Amino acid sequence: MTAIRSVVLGCGSYLPQQVLTNADLAARIDTSDEWIVQRTGIRERHIAAPGEFTSHLAINAAKAALADAGVEAQSIDLIVLATSTPDNTFPATAVAVQHGLGIHHGAAFDLQAVCSGFIFALATADNFLRSGAFKRALVIGAETFSRILDWSDRGTCVLFGDGAGAIVLEAQEQPGLSSDRGVLTTHLRSDGSHKTKLFVDGGPSTTQTVGHLRMEGREVFKHAVGMITDVVEDALARGGITARDLDWFVPHQANKRIIDASARKLGIPEEKVVVTVHLHGNTSAASVPLALGAAVADGRIRQGDLVLLEAMGGGFTWGAVLLRW
Ligand code: COA
């Protein structure tokens, strides 16, 4: 029996021009390149210019994804944008992106699941495409975390950066087999009992301010590997495969130690793991599509490859997507 699948037509990325290295940070606060690299693997991050907003980053990534897919913006009828750093409290940054791309039909909305945002957005778009509600979607992760960091808190400000990544998804009829192209299975989780371990201490309803990111780093670290490997194992089981069958593992780019420990626990060899965290730090919802974009651009990920995406973030939220490129 045939099945409607959400097939990836193309992907694109955008990183702001300004690069902030560990050495630049060490000149401002009490930290060192050695400490940051050893604990996180991060070497540099990109910072949005004054006047450069999340929507601008998202539009650049979306245009790159449309060009890579070889389709016109007018053919898009759904935009799902994952972000925790919207241009404004409302309207959704997705409508600014829709307007910036010259699209006036279909639907555009934001989705907020912090660092798991792209995984949640991809799963949401996949459900809309498979239901027949929409035909072609832009799924975007875009963030300007530099705007919500406390630059005097060395425990958090060294970890994050700005960026955006996007993919174009199309509903296509496939044979209904595990060899189908497109999204094969999605798994989403959240548990609000952890909500104070990684949060922003402001908001419209509480303080009427934007606030700053606060984190209990050790607590996040303690839970991350278990949550990630649990949800990945569910995705593999639902897909009827084992970790050995994967061609590529594209994890959330928060911390090299979390990536390495998760891959080791899952039995995924290092050469199949896509790592870009050293180049842009933790860009939250943008991190998975940025890593995906890098591995597609350099020819590692090719059509037909089996790819596992995962992320974990504030909430806590966590999730995994198994797809065939
Ligand atoms: N530079 C130098 N020293 C720093 C520092 C920095 N940027 N940040 C913290 N330290 C210091 C601390 O003050 C502390 O010093 P003390 O022992 O004198 O008090 C020491 O380093 C250890 O701090 P701790 O927070 O226990 O370090 P850690 O080994 O847990 O590493 C993280 C900190 C943040 C790197 C680590 O906890 C982590 O990676 N957590 C997960 C974070 C994450 O990925 N979050 C996003 C998930 S989406």
Image: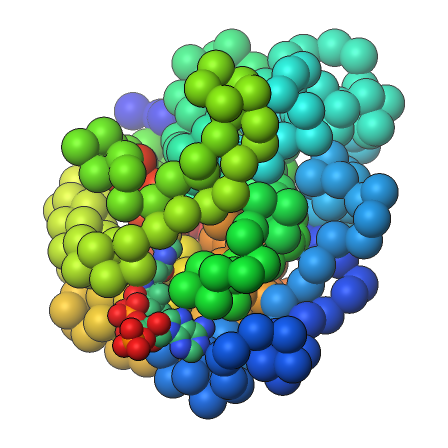
Q: In the displayed structure, would residue 233 be above or below residue 316?
A: below
Question: Where is residue 115 drawn, in percent x and y?
Answer: 43, 45
Using residue 24 as the reference point, say whether residue 251 is left or right of it: left
Location of residue 79 by image quarter:
top right
- Which residue is more in the foreground, 80 or 158? 158
Question: Where is residue 69 drawn, in percent x and y?
Answer: 70, 44
**Does the rendering let one see residue 74?**
no
Residue positioned 70% across, 39% down in the render:
54
Using residue 27 as the reference point, say whether residue 152 is left or right of it: left
Question: Where is residue 174 drawn, in percent x and y?
Answer: 42, 33
Q: Quadrant of the N terminus?
A: top left
Location of residue 14 by image quarter:
bottom right
Residue positioned 70% across, 59% down in the render:
47
Q: In the displayed structure, would residue 233 be above or below residue 53?
A: below
**Does the rendering let one see residue 95?**
yes
- Which residue is more in the foreground, 144 or 273? 144
Quadrant of the rendered image holding ligand 1: bottom left
Residue positioned 34% across, 45% down in the render:
198
Q: In the displayed structure, would residue 27 be above or below residue 319?
A: below
